[in-house]
Image: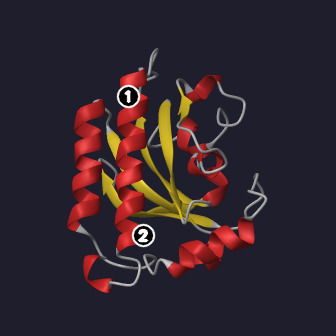
Amino acid sequence: MQEKYHDYTGPVSDNEALRLQALLNTDLLYTGENALFNRITNLTKEHLGTATALVSLVEKNRQWFKARCGLSVTETSRNVSFCSYAILAPEVMVVPDATKDERFRNNELVTGPPFIRFYAGAPIIINGNFAIGTLCVIDSKPWKTFSEEHHAFLKDMASILTLLIEHHQTDRTYR
């Protein structure tokens, strides 16, 4: 599947090769739906009041959505991925209005469907070191404030995903 995407040209972590290997070691890629992951995205979308919530796994040239609520596509090129930026820091990344953010204002997901305006993503960090993806929310309208409660909730839900992945990394039944 990755062949259809151009090589990623954006920023990467200092340990990108190890991060990608950690992602592969989860055995999550190309797996089916998972009720727990879906429940977390649904709860996140409802609690935060956004149009969309996703569990995005960031590969070399694409991001693949392990769980999604409010979006029909299952993957995008990493070159248009907000999550590629969100995995670079341990904290929640918030973009209140993508049309005003230098990194994203010309992004095809901002200028065209789904017309992303708001984005917030919490990295899913496994093995204490490797951000393999995010739990993120997006909306088609800008947000003026993303409260500390919102930050904490999104980060807590991402931490739950981390625990699920680490706890069951060798148990294929949960995937």
Query: Which SS class for mark 2?
Result: helix
Q: Nearer the viewer, residue 92 or 156?
A: 156
Query: Which SS class for mark 1?
Result: helix
Q: Locate the N terminus by quadrant.
A: bottom right
Q: Quadrant of residue 95?
A: top right
Q: Is residue 116 visible?
A: no
Q: Quadrant of residue 58?
A: bottom right
Which of the marked residues, 2 or 1, is nearer the chain's N terminus?
A: 1
Relative to 175, residue 75 above or below: above
Q: Position of residue 167 (x, y in %)?
A: 36, 71
Q: Nearer the viewer, residue 129 or 147?
A: 129
Q: Amino acid at mark 2?
A: Glu
What is the crowding at mark 1: few (fewer than 14 residues within 10 Å), some, or many (at least 20)?
Answer: some
Check residue 150 in the rendering and tell me which mark sits there, or answer none: 1
Residue position for label 2 = 166
Instruction: Single out the residue that lies furthest toward the top.
Output: 144
Relative to 4, residue 93 above or below: above
Asked if the residues shown at circle 2 and circle 1 are in contact, with their CB atoms under 8 angstroms apart, the answer is no
Q: Amino acid at mark 1?
A: His
Q: Is residue 173 visible?
A: yes
Residue in the picture at 42% in, 22% down: 148
* Apparent side of residue 77 relative to residue 150 in the rendered image (left or right): right
Q: Marks 2 and 1, how far apart in space?
A: 24 Å
Residue in the picture at 28% in, 40% down: 45
Q: Position of residue 111 (x, y in %)?
A: 57, 36
Q: Position of residue 152 (x, y in %)?
A: 40, 33
Residue in the picture at 23% in, 48% down: 42
